[in-house]
Amino acid sequence: MADKLKMFKIEMRSVLLPMKEGATFRQIHNEYKARMGCEIPLQELGVRNMRELIDLLPDVAYMAPNNNGELKVYAVPDENTAHIHRMVSKQKVGSNESEELKIKDGIRNRRAE
């Protein structure tokens, strides 16, 4: 079990680190499945749900509400991934997010007219 947990921590950190703005449980589930080709092994790790899983991994992830009050999960970098975390934290908002903001602003501007 210790080896499985150690490997899972590496996998989970690799899923979370690129997610600068944090991730919802659904986003984590989808990204894990896309990267690893399988579901998150909750039962094998002895937990019933994602909240219990994150509580099991305080050295890998933590939960906090974002500005909208939505619960997000954030990566906890280790000594091997701290440099990646620093680079990701300095990145500008992605083009998809920028496009989304432009669309929302366009909708707001039309409503104001």
Image (tube, rainbow, N blue to C red):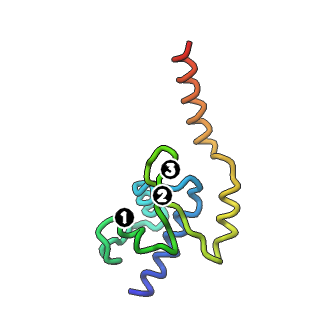
- Quick one: label 1, few (<14), some, or many (20+) residues within 10 Å? some
Among the 4 quarters of the image, the one containing residue 32: bottom left
Look at label 1 and name its amino acid: Met
Residue extending furthest toward the bottom: 2
Residue 69 at x, y percent in the picture: 45, 47
Give me the disc on residue 66: 3
Give me the disc on residue 64: 2
Look at label 2 and name its amino acid: Ala
Query: What is the C-alpha distance between the residues marked 2 and 3?
Result: 6 Å
Q: Label 1: which residue?
A: 50
Which label sits in the foreground, 2 or 1? 2
Contact check, label 2 and label 3, Cβ < 8 Å: yes
Query: Where is 40 relative to 110, above or below?
Result: below
| Mark 2 vs 1, N-terminal side | 1
Residue drawn 52% across the image and 56% down it? 22
Query: What is the C-alpha distance between the residues marked 2 and 1?
Result: 14 Å
